[in-house]
Image: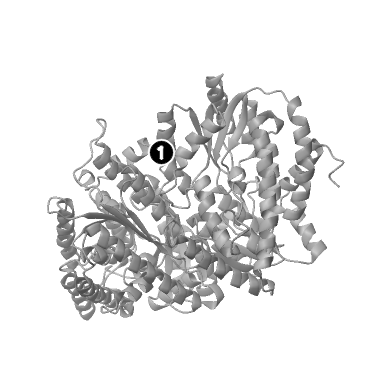
């Protein structure tokens, strides 16, 4: 098979707009204490608007880990966490943030030389957990609470697993409705908690306005992604990975509507002019698994070199305000609950499989890459079943390799190359058989 | 039938039940014509299932290497979840009629999803047990219990009354009380029973009818009491901690004792954690079971429960003092996230209290038994 290594991914230019917002957000966070803002640590789902309504800053554990890794500063905090006894098989987001938090609380040891981002994290005034489909999140936040001497108030929003009991399916059924009510009730308690932490009544007007922004951004992103059902696809999963920040920890941040509108416009323009994400798209791939943040550019070019567009993924397409129409900005709690309950990690296996099959059909998928993030067992728990059943039911071939979100020591680059090559070869053989 | 057996003979019987953990349940199914529900390891209201007239059993890790299961669950998941997936893939769980998964650990959630897929004819249920300890947690656990009760009633085609549940609670409380009496004896006379004996007692309790187990324990207890004063006590006093979900391997327990130690107490799931507290018999039953989940976690803290009012490291320090233990041996299943998150705190607490500890991270395949032996011997030697 001829491999054209010179081919590179044609990434969205407007994607860079998000960098400005990201920089503003971190600048604001780093200076939060100086400007009198309280700081809330969060993990899991995007709940920034709850804090923003109270003029509090928030730091999202996974987002922070990803940022530290994107700046190639993850090794020092991970080493510090490991030296303190945190096993390297623990969630690498958690280890990275724990290391940074311990730099803040315990100081930097003489034998480590962490970068500026890793040491800029302010200490928390409160911790809010909102984790779907993963026990790691609350356990991680509990560990953070202990690092800071068990003095930080902690609120855990329990997002109940949507198994699909008694015929309940995606956004339907008794189990779903019970779960929505349960989460809404917890959000009401979260609001009371934040009133106490911030020392002022909840600002509903601002919250509703922020949820209006969230709905707009969520809608724009879903519409832009759906334009990529076209062949060839004008943008790829790697572009959408970059666009996670505006719907995750940057949710409702000023400028996100404009930035996402620009992204959608560029995708539409590409579509109108026949410009594609990969120069000569022959294969359409689904990325199953969490993103590997320190390999994003490398992966994008790797697939482009094989004329393969990674068009969709469970990580990008089944979470982060993926059901924007359910949000009523006047009464936002139910819509937030639905988006969070029905996100990719929180669904029972039969629902997950059904959603994956729908996406595979909608995006004309030829093959699936299973990225088994070693320390994100929530994502990889259903990979083997999905590989077998999607092949059996839809004839979709797949490959898999181990990696990680922000710990590249779990990568074996040659193995990754071989596995991707093998998938492309089998897709080529399949196409040549007609 | 156990009255005429010696304590050693009874313990051998229990070891046989524990060694082939599903055989007694299968016999019971043949005898009774009733149904068996497998519980995916920790935190299940067995009493509620028992009240429906079915036999709940706690699924057990098998010591054999994982083979067929590799095709269904990644190798970087914990041994207990992989072992159960492996058993399902090999058809060894086909005797189950029902199956209950839980949400206390993501690896258990994923394992239950795979097992549900591998056993399509088995009724696949789920127990939602919200974590934490807030003002609303008790009520939320009651709701989870009501959901499970509804599903069990459908499964068993039987309405479960409060009296049924209360009756089951009494039977299970009796079992816990009897085992705690054995624990009391062992803490005073540690050489009376080996830790493998204790494991057999707990493990057999998890996989056979509790009524029958109670009968056995009622025979065993007086025989142990009669024997206790004739036992010579020697060895370094060790407290065993950890090993969630899966039983520690007998090989490891034997190595601890062969190294010159006696086990004076533990907080293992296949140990004191399983029987630490009774359920109140004077409350509305579901409210009592819910309270039990909160209370037992206060008494023997569990890292999966995310209750910041509890302090597992301090509990261990206190237990070491209570049992006059010299050393702490921590058995951690490889890839056990709840345990891994807590180890740094335990390490710090032990260092601060001046208590020596040894962490053994155990892979399911036990590929480093010689290393474990050397480490244990060197560790116990320190206290001699």
Residue at 56 percent of width and 69 percent of height? B146
Does dot 1 land on a helix, a strand or a loop? helix
Q: Quadrant of the N terminus of chain A?
A: bottom left
Residue at x-position 69% and y-position 61%: B167
| Residue under the image location 35 percent in, 68 percent down | A319
* Count of number-bearing discs: 1
Residue A284 in sight from this viewpoint: no
Q: Is residue B99 above or below residue B206?
A: below
Q: Indicate the colouring scheme.
A: one colour
x, y percent for residue B367: 57, 37
- Using the image, determine if residue B377 lies above or below residue A45: above
Which residue does the image show at 42% across and 60% down from the upper left?
B135
* Depth check, front residue: A425 or B294: B294
Viewer-proximal residue among A130 and B320:
B320
Q: As drawn, is A428 to the left or to the right of A266?
A: right
Q: Position of residue A403 (x, y in %)?
A: 39, 52
Give the image location of residue B299, x and y in percent: 52, 45
Query: Label 1, on which residue?
Result: B344
Q: Nearer the viewer, residue B335 or B75?
A: B335
Query: Which residue is farthest front?
Result: B282
Determine the image quadrant of residue B37.
Answer: bottom right
Among the 4 quarters of the image, the one containing residue A109: top left
Q: Name the chain under label 1.
A: B
Spot occupied by residue A410 in the image (x, y as percentages of width and height): 40, 47
Disc 1 crowd, CA 10 A, few/some/many (<14, 14-19, 20+): many
Along the viewing direction, whichever of A295 and A17 lies nearer the viewer? A17
User: Can residue A49 be seen at all in this image of the molecule?
Assistant: yes
Q: Residue furthest top?
A: B384
């Amino acid at each position: 098979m001829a491999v054209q290594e010179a081919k590179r991914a044609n990434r969205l230019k407007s994607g860079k707009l998000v960098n400005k917002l990201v920089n503003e957000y971190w600048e604001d966070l780093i200076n939060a204490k100086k400007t009198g803002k309280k700081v809330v640590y969060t993990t899991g789902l995007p709940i920034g608007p709850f804090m923003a309504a109270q003029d509090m800053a928030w730091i999202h554990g996974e987002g922070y880990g990803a940022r530290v890794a994107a700046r190639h500063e993850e090794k020092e905090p991970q080493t510090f966490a490991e030296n303190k006894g945190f096993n390297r098989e623990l969630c690498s987001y958690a280890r990275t943030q724990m290391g940074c938090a311990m730099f803040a609380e315990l100081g930097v040891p003489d034998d480590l030389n962490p970068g500026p981002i890793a040491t800029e994290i302010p200490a928390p005034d409160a911790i809010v957990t909102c984790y779907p489909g993963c026990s790691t999140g609350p356990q991680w936040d509990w560990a953070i609470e202990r690092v800071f001497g068990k003095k930080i108030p902690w609120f855990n929003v329990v997002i109940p697993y949507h198994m699909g009991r008694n015929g309940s399916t995606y956004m339907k059924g008794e189990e779903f409705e019970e779960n929505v009510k349960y989460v809404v009730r917890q959000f009401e308690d979260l609001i009371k908690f934040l009133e106490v932490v911030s020392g002022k009544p909840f600002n509903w007007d601002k919250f509703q306005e922020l949820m209006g922004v969230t709905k707009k951004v969520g809608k724009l992103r879903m519409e832009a992604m759906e334009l990529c059902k076209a062949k060839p696809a004008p943008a790829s999963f790697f572009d959408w990975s970059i666009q996670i920040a505006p719907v995750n920890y940057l949710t409702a941040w000023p400028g996100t509507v404009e930035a996402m509108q620009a992204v959608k416009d560029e995708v539409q323009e590409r579509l109108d002019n026949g410009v594609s994400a990969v120069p000569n798209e022959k294969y359409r791939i689904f990325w199953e698994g969490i993103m590997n943040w320190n390999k994003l550019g490398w992966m994008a070019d790797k697939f482009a070199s094989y004329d393969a567009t990674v068009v969709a993924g469970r990580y990008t397409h089944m979470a982060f305000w993926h059901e924007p129409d359910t949000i009523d900005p006047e009464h936002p709690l139910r819509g937030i609950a639905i988006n969070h309950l029905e996100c990719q990690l929180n669904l029972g296996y039969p629902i997950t499989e059904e959603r994956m099959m729908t996406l595979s059909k909608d995006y004309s998928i030829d093959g699936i890459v299973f990225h088994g993030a070693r320390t994100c067992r929530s994502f990889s728990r259903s990979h083997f079943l999905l590989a077998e059943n999607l092949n059996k039911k839809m004839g979709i071939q797949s490959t898999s390799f181990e990696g990680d979100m922000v710990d590249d020591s779990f990568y074996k680059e040659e193995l990754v190359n071989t596995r991707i090559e093998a998938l492309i070869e089998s897709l080529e053989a399949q196409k040549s058989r007609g | 039938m156990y009255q005429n057996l010696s304590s050693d003979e009874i313990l051998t019987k229990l070891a046989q039940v524990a060694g082939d953990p599903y055989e007694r349940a299968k016999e019971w199914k043949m005898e009774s014509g009733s149904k068996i529900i497998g519980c995916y390891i920790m935190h299940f209201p067995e009493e509620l299932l028992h009240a429906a007239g079915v036999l709940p059993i706690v699924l057990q890790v098998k010591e054999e290497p994982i083979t067929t299961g590799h095709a269904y669950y990644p190798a970087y998941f914990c041994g207990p979840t992989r072992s159960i997936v492996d058993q399902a893939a090999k058809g060894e769980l086909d005797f189950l009629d029902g199956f209950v998964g839980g949400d206390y650990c993501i690896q258990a959630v994923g394992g239950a999803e795979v097992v549900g897929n591998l056993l399509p004819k088995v009724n696949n249920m789920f127990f939602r047990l919200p974590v934490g300890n807030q003002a609303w947690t008790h009520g939320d656990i009651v709701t989870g219990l009501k959901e499970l009760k509804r599903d069990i009633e459908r499964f068993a085609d039987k309405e479960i009354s409060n009296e049924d549940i209360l009756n089951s609670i009494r039977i299970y409380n009796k079992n816990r009380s009897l085992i705690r009496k054995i624990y009391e004896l062992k803490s005073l006379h540690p050489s009376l029973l080996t830790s493998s004996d204790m494991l057999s007692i707990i493990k057999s309790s998890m996989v056979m009818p509790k009524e029958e187990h109670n009968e056995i324990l009622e025979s065993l207890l007086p025989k142990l009491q009669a024997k206790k004063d004739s036992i010579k006590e020697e060895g370094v006093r060790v407290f065993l901690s950890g090993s969630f979900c899966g039983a520690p391997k007998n090989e490891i327990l034997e190595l601890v004792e062969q190294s010159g130690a006696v086990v004076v107490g533990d907080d293992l799931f296949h140990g004191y954690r399983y029987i630490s507290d009774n359920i109140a018999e004077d409350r509305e039953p579901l409210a009592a079971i819910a309270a039990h989940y909160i209370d037992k976690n206060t008494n023997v803290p569990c890292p999966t429960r995310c209750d910041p009012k509890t302090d597992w490291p301090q509990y261990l320090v206190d237990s070491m003092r209570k049992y006059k233990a010299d050393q702490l041996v921590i058995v951690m299943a490889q890839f056990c996230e709840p345990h891994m998150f807590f180890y740094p705190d335990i390490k710090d607490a032990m260092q601060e209290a001046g208590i020596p500890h040894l962490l053994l991270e155990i892979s399911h395949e036990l590929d480093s038994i010689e290393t474990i032996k050397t480490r244990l011997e060197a560790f116990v030697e320190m206290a001699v």
